[in-house]
Amino acid sequence: MKKLALILLMLSTTALADEHHHHGHHGGYGGYGEHEGGHRGGDNDWILPAIIGTAIVGGAMYEYGRPSPPPTYYYPPAPVYQQAPPIYPAVPYGYHQQSVFDPSCNCYKYALVPN
């Protein structure tokens, strides 16, 4: 889209710059001869539009050629995991925990034993 706009801008500037040269001269005088008002020489009405067009196209090319800023990325912070403290069941009143040997698994287990 930018290229199309730039091409159209350049073409319109060229059309402005060549405003009077594509018309035929009327009134019986040549292109570079003496005009009715005593003016001698070529028609220089194209200079100002050419300068303005050059400035516009130069500004457009400057903006078009500038590098765009890098895209910004958002990285959410990593989640922080905390291990919950172990929850021990409350020992009922009148009991206490005691390590007891279990012959079925050949290991020690905790058991509630009356006081």
Image (cartoon, helix red, strand yellow):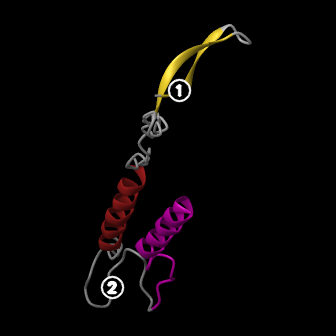
Seen at 28% across and 77% down, the residue is: 40
Seen at 29% across and 72% down, the residue is: 48
Residue 59 or residue 51, whichever sits in front: 59
Q: Is residue 16 magenta?
A: yes
**Residue at disc 2, secondary structure:** loop
For mark 2, what is the residue? 35
For mark 1, what is the residue? 113
Residue 43 or residue 34, whichever sits in front: 43
Q: Is residue 83 above or below residue 12?
A: above
Q: Which residues are magenta?
A: 1-26
Type of amino acid at the residue the image marks with label 1: Val
Instruction: Name the dominant secondary structure of the magenta segment.
Output: helix
Q: Position of residue 78 (x, y in %)?
A: 44, 39
Q: Is residue 80 above or below residue 16?
A: above
Marks 1 and 2 sit apart, C-alpha to C-alpha, by 128 Å
Q: Position of residue 39 (x, y in %)?
A: 26, 82
Type of amino acid at the residue the image marks with label 2: His
Label whose residue precedes the other's in the sequence (1 or 2): 2
Residue 56 or residue 113, whichever sits in front: 113
Q: Position of residue 113 (x, y in %)?
A: 53, 26
Q: Is residue 91 above or below residue 14?
A: above
Q: Is residue 38 left or right of residue 71?
A: left
Question: Which residue of the protein is positioned furthest toward the top in this rendering?
Answer: 106
**Residue at disc 1, secondary structure:** strand
